[in-house]
Image (cartoon, rainbow, N blue to C red):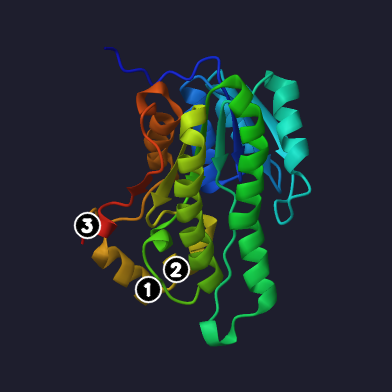
Amino acid sequence: MAVSFDLTGRSAIVTGANTGIGQALAVALAGAGAAVLGVGRSGMEETASLIEGQGGHFEGFSADLGTIAPVDSIVDAALDAFGSVDILVNNAGIIRRADAIDFTEADWDDVMNVNLKSAFFLSQAVARRMIPQGHGKIINIASMLSFQGGIRIPSYTASKSGLAGLTRLLACEWASKGINVNAIAPGYFVTNNTTALREDQKRSADILARIPAGRWGNPSELGGAAVFLASDAAAYVHGTVVPVDGGWLAR
């Protein structure tokens, strides 16, 4: 039996597609043939250029997922552009750093709203379209903090642990309806969210010492896992959290 990773004719929504991991995932899905609606708080001209430069179809949608207000409009925009929604990548995320003893309610709520609440309600809105069509792929972007505690990022750790649990819950409810819900857990990648860590010489050295691959990851190295989970090759994969971490969890 041939195994296909081809996404030609399918459409995807990728949140946080303006930079970093979201941009890399959008480019990878487009490279496999999917039309992509990228959602971001800032301009996505670079993402559009990368996708269109390889002959892909990209539509941008400006939205702040700090609230769930844009959710229905995002889904409607994808339907207007492509006629269906076949793939959703919940990548949008923010981080706040402070000792747990000093952490504020505002920093807690801001992170949880983007990283977990909006991911759930966007998944719900998309699933309401996927269930009648009998198929769909939802990919949540989790974290090493879905498995571990970390330090100085209590709301981020809680949100990413919650997202891993939500992935399993939605898989249990929707697998029988033709929807695959899975997650990717990136290790330590070169992104805006890790700038503070990479600029802290001691923390960066400690992190690198634990990564068997010996380096920070490049966001493009997450593309293969995303294309796999979005494709027919992963038809019987449900409720998994796939680490892409340079071996971090193995040590």
**Residue 213 on image: x %, y %:** 24, 53
Query: Looking at the image, which residue is at 39% across and 57% down?
Result: 188
Q: Do the residues labelled 1 and 2 touch (CB within 8 Å)?
A: yes
Query: Looking at the image, which residue is at 62% across and 64% down?
Result: 111
Residue closest to the far bottom: 101
Question: Which of the numbered marks, if any, corresponds to residue 51?
Answer: none
Give whichever of discs 3 and 1 has the lower sequence position: 1
Q: Which amino acid does label 2 sit on?
A: Leu
Q: Is mark 1 on a helix, strand or loop?
A: helix
Q: Distance between the residues labelled 1 and 2?
A: 6 Å
Quadrant including the N terminus: top left
Give whichever of discs 1 and 2 has the lower sequence position: 2
Q: Mark 3 points at which residue?
A: 250
Q: Toward which corner of the image does residue 17 lie, by quadrant?
A: top right
Q: Give the class, few, some or many, for how many residues have Cα within 10 Å of label 1's Cα (few <14, many ≥20).
A: few
Question: Which of the numbered marks, if any, corresponds to residue 203?
Answer: 1
Q: Distance between the residues labelled 3 and 1?
A: 20 Å
Quadrant including the C terminus: bottom left
Q: What element carries label 3?
A: helix
Q: What residue type is labelled 3?
A: Ala
